[in-house]
Amino acid sequence: MTMGCFYCDEHHEGREAIMFKVGDMKAGTLYLFKDQAHKGRCALALKSHKKELCECDEQERNDYCADLAAASGAIKKLWGCTKINLGSFGDSNPHLHFHIVPKYEGGFEFGGSFAITNPEPVFLKDEEYKEMISQLQKELGL
């Protein structure tokens, strides 16, 4: 654990301002974004403090990729998106994480690029976040 890290710190103000912890998977920790302009948008952070996928040994890389596939599949099953876009953006956050961005045909940004911060964020009621987290936890066995 590296103190001062967005993902390693148990309580990081920056992370908690924009996402909720869903749960720990085999090699990663899944988070649900508060901005739900892309319904089901999450991030999967590697549990160990590494910057790049190529820094993982074979087992950790395989486990992390399996977590990424499972989380993506759960999101697609639960909310029926048309496409899941995956991106690893870590220029200023040196901790390996992938954004899991569901896209819906006819919906926000479909067919276009993805913006990390949406100009028109969609925030839900607390109960709605709790329900989404519960659904993900159930689907993933967390």
Image: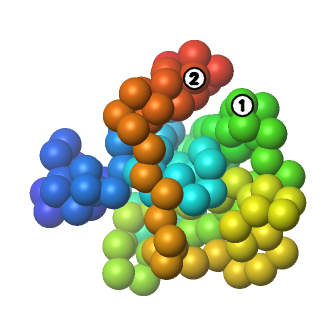
**On screen, 40 above or below 22?**
below
Q: What number of labels is visible?
A: 2
Residue that appears at 44% across and 35% down: 129
Label 2 close to label 1 by CB (< 8 Å): yes
The amino acid type, in three-letter code, at marker 1 is Leu
- Residue 113, given in percent of the width and then of the height, sits at 71, 81
Marks 2 and 1, the one that precedes in the sequence: 1
- Residue 99, given in percent of the width and then of the height, sits at 56, 60
**On screen, 108 above or below 132?**
below
Residue that appears at 16% across and 56% down: 13
Residue that appears at 22% across and 62% down: 14
- SS for callout 1: helix
The answer to which of 142 and 8 lies nearer the viewer is: 142
The answer to which of 79 and 10 lies nearer the viewer is: 79
Q: What residue sits right under mark 1 in the picture?
A: 78
Distance, label 2 to label 1, CA atoms, is 8 Å
- SS for callout 2: helix
Q: Quadrant of residue 63?
A: top right
Residue that appears at 84% across and 63% down: 106
Q: How is the image coloured?
A: rainbow
**On screen, 20 above or below 106?**
above
Q: Is residue 136 visible?
A: yes
Q: Quadrant of residue 110?
A: bottom right
Q: What residue sits right under mark 2 in the picture?
A: 135
Q: Is residue 68 left or right of residue 116?
A: right
Q: Is residue 22 visible?
A: no
